Image: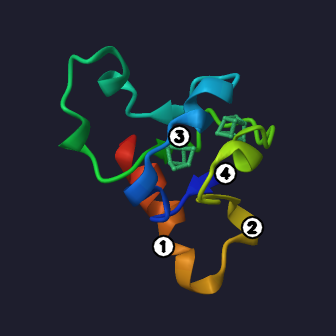
Amino acid sequence: AHVITDRCREAKDQSCVEVCPVDCIHPTAFLDGDEPFQTTTQLYINPDTCIDCGACVPVCPVEAIFMADDLPVDQQKFIELNAAYYQ
Ligand code: SF4
Ligand code: F3S
C-alpha cells in the first residue's frame, strides 16, 4: 500500500483525497464542514483498500506520500500509523 508520512501535517492539502479512485484516504469529514479540521494531525491511507495506483503521489505539494517499500528507514513507522487509523 501507499503511506502518508508526517510531511502532511503542516499542509493537509487534500489533493490526494480528490484523485484517489477508491476513496481510501481519510479522514475526509472536514471536507463537508461537519468536523473540525483540527481533529487529526494528518491524513492516512487505508492499506486494505489502497490499490497502489500511485495517483496520489505526484499531486501532494509536500511529497508526503510514498509507496511503503520506498519509505526511508526512519519513516517506516508510518506504515503502522496509517494502518492503525483504520483499526
Ligand atoms: Fe488511493 Fe491510489 Fe494513492 Fe492508494 S495509491 S491511496 S489507491 S490514490
Ligand atoms: Fe496531506 Fe499531501 Fe494529501 S499534504 S492531505 S498527503 S495531498
Q: Disc 2 to disc 4, how far (Cα)?
A: 9 Å
User: What is the x, y in percent for residue 54?
Assistant: 79, 43
User: What residue appears at the point 38 percent right and 52 percent down from the top-left corner?
Assistant: 84
Disc on the earlier residue, 2 or 4: 4
Left or right of residue 47, residue 26 in this image = left
Q: CA distance from mark 2 to mark 3?
A: 16 Å
Please, what secondary structure does the residue beneath circle 4 have? Answer: strand
Task: Please state which amino acid type lies under the numbered disc 2.
Answer: Asp
Which residue shows up at 55% across the image and 85% down it? 74
Residue 47 sits in quarter: top right
> If you read the primary sequence from the N terminus, does the residue marked by circle 2 or circle 3 appear first?
3
Identity, as a three-letter code, of the amino acid under mark 1: Lys
| Residue at mark 4: C-beta within 8 A of ligand 1 | yes
Which residue is the site of mark 3?
46
Query: Mark 2 — residue?
Result: 69
Query: How far apart are the alpha carbons under marks 1 and 2?
Result: 12 Å
Q: Residue furthest bottom?
A: 74
Ligand 1 occupies quarter: top right
Horizontally, residue 70 falls left or right of residue 25, namely right
How far across and how far down the image is residue 2, in percent?
A: 67, 51
| Residue pictured at 36% horizontal, 46% vertical | 85
Q: Which residue is mark 4?
A: 2
Q: Earlier in the sequence, mark 1 or mark 3?
A: 3
Q: Which residue is mark 1?
A: 77
Any atom of ligand 1 within 8 Å of the CB at mark 3?
Answer: yes
Q: Earlier in the sequence, mark 1 or mark 2?
A: 2
- The tag on residue 55 is none
